[in-house]
Amino acid sequence: MTGQTVSKTRLQDGMWEGVVQAPDGLKPNLRVSHEGRVVSEINIEAMGDGQWKLRIPIPSQAIADGIQTITISDPETEQILETITLLTGDMLDEDIRAEISLLREELDMLKRAFRRHCLETE
């Protein structure tokens, strides 16, 4: 589904919450992943006017030293709609590491899309 947007509202008690704006009022189709693994326990509830409340429990694997990135994407277009970045452990001198982590996630997504494209065009 194209045209979806995701906006964070809060992160509290290990639960990330946001609002999804979906075209035509259709229920959003989202993929949430951390280190290439799908986070399957997401909750999407209708709010009206094409808006949906999105709740994502932070996976326990994402609570670790360093920078952890969870991506929310549109599985049809592979477009990343929002990221959740967690920084823990020693203070980081630069936040460039968060950008590198996000680039790794995007590169993995591009690799999957390229492999799928190659299989479909054989």
Image (tube, grey):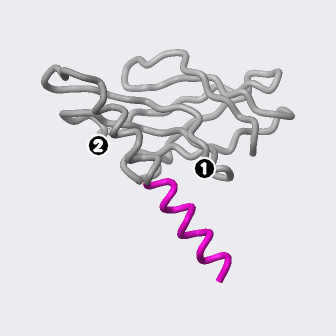
Check the image and name the residue furthest to the bottom: 122
**Relative to 20, 113 lies left or right:** left
Residue 118, labelled with which disc? none
* Residue position marked by numbered label 2 in the rendering: 61
- Image spot of residue 11 (x, y percent): 43, 19
The image quadrant of residue 119 is bottom right
| Badge 1 amino acid | Glu
The question of residue 86 being in magenta is answered with: no
Q: Quadrant of the C terminus?
A: bottom right
Crowdedness of circle 1 by 10 Å Cα count: few (<14), some, many (20+)? some
Local secondary structure at mark 1? loop
> Which residue occupies 80% across, 26% down?
50
> Which residue occupies 74% across, 24% down?
51
**Relative to 89, 77 lies left or right:** right
> Which residue occupies 52% across, 23% down?
17
- Above or below residue 84? Residue 74 is below
Crowdedness of circle 2 by 10 Å Cα count: few (<14), some, many (20+)? few
> Which residue occupies 38% across, 29% down?
85
The answer to which of 80 and 49 lies nearer the viewer is 80
Q: Which residues are magenta?
A: 108-122
Check the image and name the residue furthest to the left: 90
- Image spot of residue 78 (x, y percent): 60, 50
- Above or below residue 48? Residue 60 is below
The answer to which of 16 and 4 lies nearer the viewer is 4
Which of the two labelled residues, at mark 2 and mark 1, occupies the earlier sequence position?
2
The question of residue 113 being in magenta is answered with: yes
- Image spot of residue 30 (x, y percent): 62, 43
| Badge 2 amino acid | Gln
**Relative to 53, 14 lies left or right:** left
Local secondary structure at mark 2? helix
* Residue position marked by numbered label 1 in the rendering: 78
Q: Nearer the viewer, mark 2 or mark 1?
A: 1
